[in-house]
Amino acid sequence: MKLSVLDQAPVTMGNKSADALIKAEELAVLADELGYHRMWMAEHHGTKSHVSSAPEITAARLAAKTENIRIGTGGVMMMHYSPLKLAEVFKTLSAFSPGRIDFGAGRAPGGDHFAMYALAQGGQPKVDDLYEKFRIAMQLLNDEVPEGRLYGSVPAYPADVVRPEAWMLGSTGNSAIATAEMGAGYSFAQFFNGELSKDILDLYKNRFKPSALMEKPAINVSYMATVAETREEAEYEALPYDISRLMMQQGRITQTMTPEEAQNYPLSEMDKMAIREGRKLHLVGSAKEVAEQLKEEQEMYGFEEAMICSIPHSQEKRLDVYRLLAKELL
């Protein structure tokens, strides 16, 4: 199994937001040393709990600090950008780090409606043409000239760089089909809704058409995971994230508290039930237990790569998650 990293630059309680980006760099260097396949930065706007607001800039820094691991975005949120600008950014990244750059794109806003309209400078956000925008960006990344007056007269430079891999984030059969027919990799965010199905992945594989940016079907699945040497320790480190997710479902976005604070946090029986239900979206246990679950799901669904997102309060505990999973799976 290929093992990869998804980072959202989380800011846990008591820490500074700028430090989250330095911690992303630390994680990238470690993941590179451990043999992880790729690392992506998510895109979030207007929240103090996740500060990866410019993933393409962070990607440039991470690529410069690593040697072998692929670096990219998971994903850059297309509604905020022109296909021309997207192509220029990722071709520039590829010029500096040839053969190691991923153009991973998403169709969500990456923030609430206040952020969405602010990024659109008060105009109407363009949410209806995102697959077409992705298709045009892929053409420009391949030094092609798109049809039409708008993009047909402006090549994306630099030219003649190693083509980045193209990936689309998704979680439905519709996105699987669209991604396959454009010839891009398919990244399924299992920790969003837990609705991964073999039918969706098979649909993607069966409808895939090769492109210059992806020659054959490629699938990765993103999981939220907290692991430790023992299940008891993992449960202790996982509870702060579980509470943060519970609060988010209640409309309260907050930073992840310390494990000590989480142990003393007043939870109703309904809260505890919601947390238990949320464990469908959060893999918690010893590294061996979680590794076995990942291998079982790989066999069940037929994907080749698991992408791990992990948000313990402590950076050292977070790095330990990736060390322990690498020991089991790489």
Image (tube, rainbow, N blue to C red):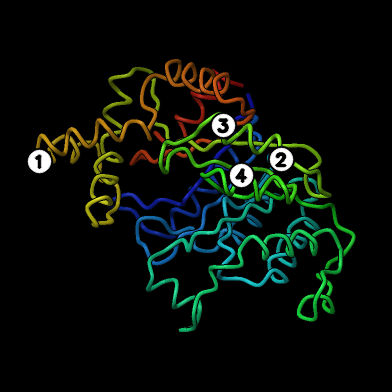
Cβ atoms at labels 2 and 4 below 8 Å apart: yes
Amino acid on which disc 4 is placed: Ala
Q: Residues within 10 Å of mark 4 (few under 14, many from 20)?
A: many
Ranked by sequence position, the earlier of labels 3 and 2 is 3
Mark 2 highlights which residue? 207
- Measure the alpha-carbon separation of dots 3 and 4: 10 Å
Q: How many marks?
A: 4
What residue appears at the point 82 percent right and 71 percent down from the top-left corner? 147
Mark 1 highlights which residue? 266
**Which quadrant: the N terminus?**
top right
Ranked by sequence position, the earlier of labels 1 and 3 is 3
Q: Residues within 10 Å of mark 3 (few under 14, many from 20)?
A: few
Task: Residue 166: give x, y in percent of width and height.
Answer: 71, 50
What residue appears at the point 58 percent right and 49 percent down from the top-left corner? 175
Cβ atoms at labels 1 and 2 below 8 Å apart: no
Residue sitting nearer the eye, 290 or 311:
290
Amino acid on which disc 1 is placed: Pro
Q: Left or right? Give the position of 136 relative to 248.
A: right
- Badge 1 marks a residue whose secondary structure is loop
Q: Left or right? Give the position of 133 relative to 22.
A: right
Task: Residue 323: give x, y in percent of width and height.
Answer: 51, 27
Ranked by sequence position, the earlier of labels 1 and 2 is 2
Ranked by sequence position, the earlier of labels 4 and 1 is 4
Mark 3 highlights which residue? 199
Mark 4 highlights which residue? 176
- Measure the alpha-carbon separation of dots 1 and 2: 49 Å
Cβ atoms at labels 4 and 1 below 8 Å apart: no
Q: Left or right? Give the position of 151 relative to 127.
A: right
Residue found at the very far bottom of the displayed protein: 122
